[in-house]
Amino acid sequence: MSPFWGEKFGNPSSIHGFGRDAIMALDEARESVARFFGVKDGEVYFTGSATEADNWALWGIAHGIAKKYKTPLSALHIVVSAIEHKAVLAMAQRLESEGVGVTYISPTNEGLITAEAIKAAIRPNTILVSVMYVNNEVGAINPIAQIGRIVEQERQSRLNQQKANQLQAISYKLPIHFHTDAVQAVQFLDCRLDYIKADALTFSGHKIYGPKGVGGLVIRESVPLEPLIIGGGQEADKRSGTENIAGIVGLAKALELTTVWRASGGAEKIKQLRGALWQGIKSKVPKAMLNGPALESPDRVANNLNVCFKGADGESLLIALDLVGVACSAGSACAAGATEPSHVLQAMGRSEADVRASIRFGLGRQNTEEEIEQVIKVLPDLVAKVSR
Ligand code: PLP
């Protein structure tokens, strides 16, 4: 990244030599990202965050379809899960205020969105389904390829009906697309669009040890997409604003390194550490309860441990842990330091007290066995201090 803050400081929109260096770096990064997701270079757009990419996917597809099919927003319907990151939920609510119908799908009590629930929610005028690949709070891995297949079947069936000219209703002329927020999945799971049957996917730099403040949207060229940020026409006129070259180069490199790390079995080590942490917690704090799918289940990503310490005050526990150098989260760490009760645990049917008593340990590539032992050592006393 560092040359792009110094000797290669050019703007990719400039035609002079410095600009050409920048554009070459941008092209190479796009090519590499496209390879990671199994798409064409022109199907990768860089953004300033995953939040922007999520916002854009929902807003851009709804407005893109309304424009292309000359349909009012109020004639459109979208399906999102109730456990999405706020970047999706807040935009779904905005679209609702613009007239779009929105169905919010509740998870199972383990935090999973089933393909059946999605299928049942699709209406003739549904134009978009958005379900996250991995939930950031409880680590649940949604059956994304199954959901993608349902959307694909619905699209095909609409085309067949149209061809057979059986239906004249405007809604059957509308396409349906599938977007997934894969921010938490990229480190661990196959994210090629063909494999997961998605038409659009959000990713971010900082969840894969890349830079903060850079993300992207991968989207099939066939999907109508209105730009959300307009101006100078960068990113093929879809996302204006001078590109963050250093950030983009770093993001592409982080994806390449993730591929290498995955192949080296890195996730297995994180999983073992997490298992040891959970065993230690359970043996020392018997009232601890796991939130989300079982740790050994294939439905849970390797780095997440979300625990309810029944009767404890989660926020006080976070502060007490922080004072001894242990960094944890409650709710979503990406929600600007907020310790609002988690909408994810609430949607999973947890009581308010249990939601407030829950905290999340996110394990990473650099964590060690000694650190796990240290947490297990300090935790019981701290839990006792913050419990009723
Ligand atoms: N989506 C998910 C699932 C997340 O975990 C996050 C937080 O990192 C985001 C979206 C928002 O990402 P960003 O902070 O890049 O806007």
Image (cartoon, helix red, strand yellow):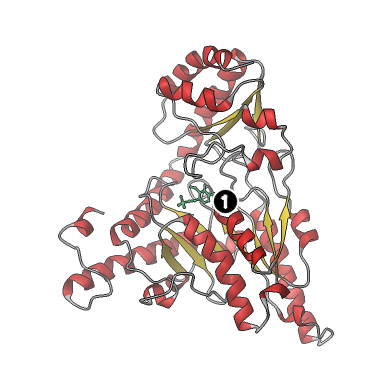
Q: What element carries label 1?
A: helix
Can residue 372 be seen at all in this image of the molecule?
Answer: no
Q: Residue at x 18, y 70 (%)?
A: 18
| Residue closest to the eye, 243 or 252 | 243
Q: What residue type is labelled 1?
A: Lys
**Position of residue 308 in the picture relative to residue 47 (left or right):** right
| Residue closest to the eye, 210 or 382 | 382
Residue sitting at the far right: 166
On screen, residue 304 above or below 189: above
Residue 288, located in which quarter of the rendered image? top right
Residue sitting at the far left: 7
On screen, residue 29 above or below 65: above
Counting from the top left corner in percent of width and height, residue 21 is at 22, 69
**Position of residue 10 in the picture relative to residue 121 (left or right):** left
Counting from the top left corner in percent of width and height, residue 33 is at 41, 61
**Position of residue 232 in the picture relative to residue 97 (left or right):** left
Q: Which residue is drawn at 53% across and 23% down?
A: 317
- State whether label 1 is within 8 Å of ligand 1: no
**Position of residue 36 in the picture relative to residue 198 (left or right):** left
Residue 116, located in which quarter of the rendered image? bottom right
Counting from the top left corner in percent of width and height, residue 345 is at 66, 38
Instruction: Tell me the quadrant of the picture where the C terminus can be found.
Output: top right
Counting the numbered discs, the total is 1
Q: Residue at x 54, y 37 (%)?
A: 302
Can residue 245 be seen at all in this image of the molecule?
Answer: yes
**Disc 1: which residue:** 86
